[in-house]
C-alpha cells in the first residue's frame, strides 16, 4: 500500500519540501518505528474477490496478519495519534502542502494513511475553496480502496454549495447513497449553501428533487426557502415549497402567509393578496393575520394601478381597528396609510395618520422611501401646500428635521407662477411675484428650453392632456389649490356649524341660565358666521351691463389697453375672460372692502359656553346609557333653517373608519354652486316643508348613528358572531323604537342590537390621545400678521432642510408683510433673500423704506438701509436723504427735551 501511494505526485519523495516541523515529526516517528518494527508482520495478500472492496471507516490504516485479527501495539497507536494531531492542525489552517508532508511522514514511518488522514487532506482543499484539488484527493482515496468518511462528503457538499455547483453536489449525494450513507444532512447542507451563495434557482431544484425522493427538510429550511423565494418574487416556487411543507405535516403559519403576501403585494393585482388575506382571517389561530399582513394588503391596494382602491383600504382599516386588542399598527402601517390617503387626495385622513406616524423615530424617512412609488413624502407636503394647510405643513417639516430627512426635490416643484410651497398658498395665487424690476420674458423663455422644445407647456394643445407636473404621483390629479386664508375661513365656518348643531341638539340649557332672546341672538350670530360673505360679490359683472369706467377698470387691472370705444372695450374684456377660463385662471372681480365684524363680547362669551364632545367616547357612552339627558332631549326640535347644517362637515367624519373615510374624500369642500337667488329660495322652501315631518322624530344620538351601518354585510367575524347572538323573529316591528329617547336606548340594550363595549373610535383603539383636542379646539381666525409669521417660519424650515426658495417666494412673502403691514418682518425677509443671492429692484426697496418711515418705524428703515449697504446694493440718494431727514427730525425734539 505504501509503495503504491508513493507513486502519486502529492506524496512523491522530495527532500526540498520537507520542512522543519516535518523533520521533528519524522524524528519522533523513527524512534517509535524502531520500537514497533519487531512486532510487525508481513502484509497479507488480498484475495482476488476483495480487490475492489473499500476499507470501512473503522479501519484506521492498520495492516493485519493472515488471520485478519491484528491488534496494533500501544506504541503504534501513540505514533498514529501524534501524526493525526499534526495533520489535523495543518488541515484546520488550510495548509495543503503541510497535510501532504505529514501523510508522507506517516508512510515513511510505516503507517498506512486511513480515511481520517484523507479527510484532513480534503478539508485543507475545502478551506482553500479548491474544488478540483478536493475532488482529486477524493479520487486518490477511492483509488486506494479506502471508504471516505461521512464528514468528508459533507465538506465537499459545503464547498460545491458555496460555489454554486449544484450538479456536482448532486453527484456527491449520489455517491453517498451508493455507499449506503444517510444523505439527508448533506442534502440540507447543500440547499443552505446554495441559498447563501445566491443560487436560489439551483437550491429550489435540489430541494424539489430531494422532496420527490422522500426527504424531509427542517423547519428552518422551509422558512428560509419560502422567505428567499418571496424576496425575489418567485411566488410559484414559494407556494410549491409551502405545499411540500404542509404535506410533510407542518402547517403554514402567519409568517409563511406574510411571505406570500409580500410577493403578491407587488404583482399589481391586489385581489390575489386579499384572497390570501381572507384565508388567514377565517383560518386557525396560528395563521391569523398580524400587523404585517395588513401592511402588505394595504400596500397592494395603495400601489395598484387600476380602479379606485381607497374604499378597500378603508374597509381593511376598519377590520384592523376592530381587532385592536390583538394587534396594533406600526410605523409601516402609518406610512402606507398616509401614502394611500395622500395619493387619493383624502388629505384630512392623511393628516390624522401622519400625527400617528411622527411618534415613531424615522417615520418620515420610511414615508420618503428613497423617492420610490411616487415619493409619498413629497406628495404629502404638496397636498398640504395646495390645500392651504400650512400649520400641518410646518409640523411635517419639523418632524423631518427631527428625523434628519432632507426635503425632496419633488416637494419643491415650481408652480406656473414660479413659486414653491414657500409662498404658493399666499393670495393672490395666480399672479407672479412683483420683483421691483422688469422681467426679461424672452431670456426666461430661452433659458427654459423654449428654442429647443424642452420647455414644458402648462396649457396643453387642443385635445392633449394637461401637463401640470404637480399631478405626477397622485392617482387622479393633485388636490384643488386653495389659499391659506380661504382654508382658515372655511374651518372657521365648519367649527361654528358644529357649535350650532350642538346648540340645537342640547337646547338653551347648554348656555346656562339665559333668556330666550339671548338664545336667539346666539343662533343668529352663528348663522351669520356660517353663511359667510355674500358670494355674489365675488362674481364678475356681466360685460354687457358694465359701463365704460368699469370696463376700463377691469382692463387696467389686468395690464391691458384701455383705449377705444365702448364696443372695443367690451370685446377686449370678453376675450380676456375667455383666455382666463381656458387657462384655468380666476376671473377678475372688483376689490370688495371687507366689513369689519362687530365684536360683541357678551355673545362671544355665551358661544364659548358651548362645549363640543367630538371624540369623547366616555361622554357618548354615558349618553347612550341614558345619563345626562334632560327634558330638552325628549322634545321635538324646532329647527327652521336646515340649509345652514346641510353642508357635509368633514371635521365630523373619521371616527367610524369604514364608511366615513369615503365621506372624507370631499375634504371639507363646501357646496357653493352658482344658482340664482330665486331657485335657492324655492329649494329652501321645499326642504323646509319636507323637514317639518322629521321634526317630531327624537334626537339622533351617536348610538343611533352607529346603527346606520348595522344592516350592511361586513367581512368581520366578530360582527358575524355578534349578529348570531341576536336570535329574534323577523316581523314588521323589528325596526321600531320608542319615541322617548331613554326608552329607545333601553330597547337597544335589551335587544343587544348595540353593545356599549363596542362603542369606540380609531382614536380609542390606537391610543390617539391627541385626537380629541384637535377635534374640539377652536380654529384660529385668519390674520395677515399670522400669515406672514407662518411664511417666515416655513421659509426658514425649508432652507434648513436643504430647499431653496425662489426669488418669487421671497417677493410674495415680502408683499404679504407690506400688506399687513409688519415692519418688524421686513428686515428678516430681506436678509434671507440676500443670503440666497437674490436682489430685488430698486422701486421695491424704496417702497419698503418709505412705508417704514410713514409708519414711524425709523429704526426699521435704518436697519434696512444698513443691510442693503452691507449686501452691496446701492441705495438711491433720494431714499438716503429721506431717512437722514427723518432721523434729524426725530433727534430735534429729543435735544429740545434734554435742554429743557
Image: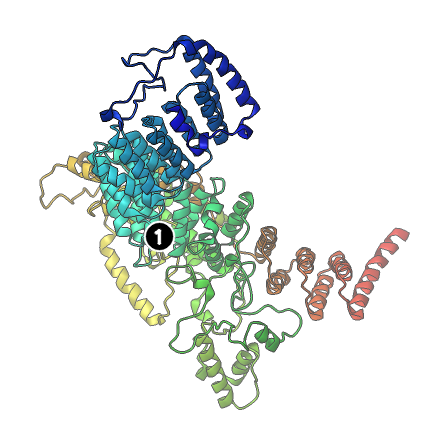
Let me know if residue 457 appears in the view: yes
Quarter of the image for residue 282 reads top left
Let me know if residue 612 appears in the view: no
Q: Nearer the viewer, residue 502 or 449?
A: 449
Whole-percent x, y for residue 426 in the image: 54, 61
Whole-percent x, y for residue 765 in the image: 35, 37
Q: Nearer the viewer, residue 464 or 732?
A: 464
Q: Residue at x 46, y 79 (%)?
A: 579
Q: Residue at x 16, y 35 (%)?
A: 725
Which image quarter holds the N terminus?
Answer: top left
Q: Nearer the viewer, residue 118 or 266?
A: 118
Q: Nearer the viewer, residue 373 or 94?
A: 94
Query: Which residue is denoted by mark 1 in the rendering?
Result: 302
In the rendered view, tell whether residue 544 sits above or below residue 398: below
Whole-percent x, y for residue 21 in the image: 55, 22
Whole-percent x, y for residue 360 in the image: 47, 39
Amino acid at each position: 500500500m505504501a509503495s503504491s501511494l508513493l507513486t502519486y505526485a502529492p506524496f512523491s519523495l522530495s527532500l526540498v519540501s520537507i520542512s522543519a516541523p516535518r523533520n521533528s515529526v519524522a524524528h519522533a516517528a523513527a524512534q517509535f518505528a524502531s520500537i514497533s518494527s519487531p512486532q510487525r508482520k508481513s502484509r497479507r495478500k488480498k484475495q482476488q474477490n476483495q480487490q475492489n472492496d473499500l476499507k470501512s471507516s473503522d479501519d484506521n490504516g492498520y495492516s493485519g496478519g493472515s488471520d485478519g485479527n491484528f491488534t496494533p501495539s500501544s506504541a503504534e497507536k501513540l505514533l498514529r495519534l501524534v501524526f493525526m494531531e499534526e495533520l489535523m492542525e495543518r488541515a484546520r489552517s488550510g495548509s495543503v502542502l503541510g497535510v501532504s508532508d505529514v501523510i508522507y511522514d506517516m508512510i515513511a514511518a510505516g503507517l498506512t494513511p486511513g480515511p481520517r488522514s484523507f479527510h484532513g487532506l480534503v478539508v485543507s482543499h475545502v478551506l482553500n475553496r479548491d474544488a478540483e484539488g478536493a475532488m482529486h484527493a477524493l479520487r486518490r482515496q477511492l483509488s486506494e480502496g479506502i471508504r471516505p468518511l461521512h464528514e468528508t462528503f459533507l465538506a465537499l457538499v459545503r464547498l460545491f454549495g458555496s460555489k454554486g455547483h449544484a450538479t456536482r453536489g448532486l453527484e456527491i449525494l449520489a455517491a453517498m447513497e451508493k455507499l449506503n450513507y444517510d444523505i439527508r444532512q448533506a442534502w440540507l447542507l447543500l440547499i443552505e449553501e446554495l441559498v447563501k451563495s445566491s443560487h436560489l434557482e439551483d437550491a429550489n431544484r435540489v430541494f424539489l428533487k430531494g422532496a420527490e425522493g422522500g426527504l424531509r427538510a427542517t423547519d428552518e429550511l422551509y422558512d428560509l426557502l419560502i422567505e428567499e423565494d418571496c424576496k425575489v418574487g418567485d411566488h410559484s416556487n414559494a407556494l410549491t415549497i409551502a405545499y411540500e411543507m404542509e404535506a410533510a405535516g407542518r402547517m403554514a403559519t402567519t409568517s409563511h402567509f406574510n411571505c406570500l403576501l409580500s410577493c403578491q403585494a407587488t404583482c399589481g393585482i391586489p385581489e390575489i393578496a386579499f384572497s390570501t388575506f381572507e384565508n388567514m382571517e377565517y383560518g386557525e389561530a396560528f395563521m391569523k393575520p398580524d400587523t404585517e399582513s395588513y401592511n402588505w394588503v394595504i400596500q397592494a391596494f395603495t400601489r395598484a394601478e387600476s380602479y379606485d382602491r381607497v374604499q378597500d383600504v378603508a374597509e381593511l382599516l376598519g377590520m384592523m381597528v376592530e381587532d385592536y386588542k390583538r394587534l396594533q399598527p406600526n410605523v409601516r402601517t402609518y406610512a402606507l396609510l398616509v401614502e394611500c390617503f395622500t395619493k387619493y387626495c383624502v388629505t384630512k385622513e392623511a393628516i390624522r395618520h401622519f400625527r400617528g406616524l411622527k411618534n415613531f423615530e424615522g417615520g418620515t424617512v420610511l414615508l420618503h422611501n428613497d423617492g420610490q412609488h411616487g415619493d409619498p413624502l413629497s406628495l404629502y407636503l404638496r397636498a398640504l401646500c395646495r390645500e392651504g394647510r400650512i400649520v400641518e405643513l410646518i409640523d411635517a417639516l419639523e418632524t423631518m428635521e427631527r428625523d434628519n430627512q432632507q426635503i425632496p426635490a419633488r416637494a419643491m416643484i415650481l408652480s406656473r407662477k414660479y413659486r414653491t410651497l414657500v409662498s404658493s398658498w399666499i393670495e393672490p395665487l395666480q399672479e407672479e411675484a412683483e420683483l421691483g424690476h422688469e422681467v426679461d420674458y424672452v431670456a426666461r423663455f430661452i433659458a427654459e428650453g423654449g428654442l429647443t422644445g424642452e420647455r414644458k407647456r402648462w396649457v396643453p394643445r387642443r385635445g392633449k392632456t394637461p401637463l401640470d407636473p404637480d399631478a405626477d404621483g397622485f392617482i387622479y390629479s393633485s388636490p384643488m389649490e386653495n389659499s391659506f386664508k380661504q382654508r382658515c375661513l372655511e374651518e372657521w365656518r365648519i367649527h361654528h356649524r358644529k357649535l350650532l348643531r350642538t346648540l340645537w341638539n342640547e337646547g338653551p340649557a347648554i348656555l346656562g341660565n339665559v333668556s330666550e332672546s339671548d338664545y336667539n341672538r346666539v343662533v343668529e350670530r352663528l348663522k351669520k358666521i356660517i353663511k359667510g360673505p355674500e358670494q355674489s360679490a365675488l362674481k364678475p359683472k356681466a360685460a354687457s351691463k358694465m359701463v365704460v369706467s368699469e370696463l376700463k377698470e377691469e382692463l387696467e387691472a389686468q395690464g391691458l389697453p384701455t383705449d377705444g370705444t365702448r364696443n372695443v372695450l367690451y370685446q377686449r374684456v370678453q376675450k380676456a375672460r375667455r383666455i382666463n377660463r381656458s387657462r384655468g385662471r380666476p376671473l377678475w372681480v372688483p376689490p370688495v372692502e371687507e366689513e369689519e365684524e362687530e365684536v360683541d363680547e357678551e355673545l362671544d362669551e355665551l358661544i364659548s359656553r358651548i362645549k363640543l364632545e367630538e371624540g369623547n367616547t366616555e361622554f357618548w357612552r354615558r349618553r347612550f346609557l341614558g345619563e345626562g339627558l334632560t327634558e330638552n332631549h325628549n322634545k321635538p326640535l324646532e329647527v327652521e333653517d336646515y340649509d345652514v347644517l346641510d353642508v357635509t362637515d368633514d371635521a365630523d367624519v373619521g371616527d367610524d373608519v369604514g364608511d366615513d373615510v369615503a365621506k372624507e374624500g370631499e375634504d371639507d369642500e363646501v357646496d357653493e354652486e352658482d344658482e340664482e337667488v330665486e331657485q335657492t329660495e324655492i329649494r329652501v322652501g321645499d326642504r323646509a316643508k319636507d323637514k317639518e315631518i322629521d321634526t317630531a322624530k327624537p334626537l339622533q344620538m351617536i348610538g343611533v348613528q352607529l346603527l346606520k351601518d348595522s344592516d350592511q354585510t361586513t367581512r368581520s367575524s366578530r360582527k358575524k358572531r355578534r349578529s348570531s347572538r341576536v336570535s329574534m323573529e323577523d316581523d314588521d316591528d323589528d325596526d321600531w323604537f320608542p319615541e322617548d329617547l331613554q326608552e329607545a336606548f333601553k330597547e337597544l340594550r335589551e335587544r343587544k342590537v348595540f353593545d356599549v363595549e363596542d362603542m369606540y373610535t380609531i382614536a380609542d383603539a390606537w391610543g390617539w390621545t391627541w385626537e380629541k383636542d384637535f377635534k374640539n379646539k377652536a380654529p384660529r381666525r385668519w390674520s395677515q400678521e399670522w400669515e406672514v409669521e407662518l411664511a417666515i417660519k416655513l421659509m426658514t424650515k425649508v432652507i434648513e432642510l436643504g430647499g431653496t426658495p425662489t426669488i418669487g417666494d421671497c417677493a410674495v412673502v415680502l408683499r404679504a408683510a407690506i400688506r399687513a403691514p409688519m415692519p418688524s418682518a421686513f428686515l428678516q425677509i430681506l436678509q434671507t433673500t440676500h443670503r440666497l443671492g437674490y436682489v430685488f429692484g430698486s422701486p421695491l426697496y424704496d417702497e419698503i423704506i418709505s412705508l417704514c418711515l410713514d409708519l414711524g418705524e425709523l429704526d426699521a428703515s435704518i436697519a434696512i438701509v444698513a443691510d442693503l449697504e452691507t449686501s452691496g446694493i446701492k441705495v438711491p440718494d433720494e431714499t438716503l436723504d429721506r431717512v437722514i431727514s427723518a432721523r434729524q427730525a426725530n433727534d430735534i425734539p429729543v435735544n429740545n427735551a434734554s435742554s429743557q
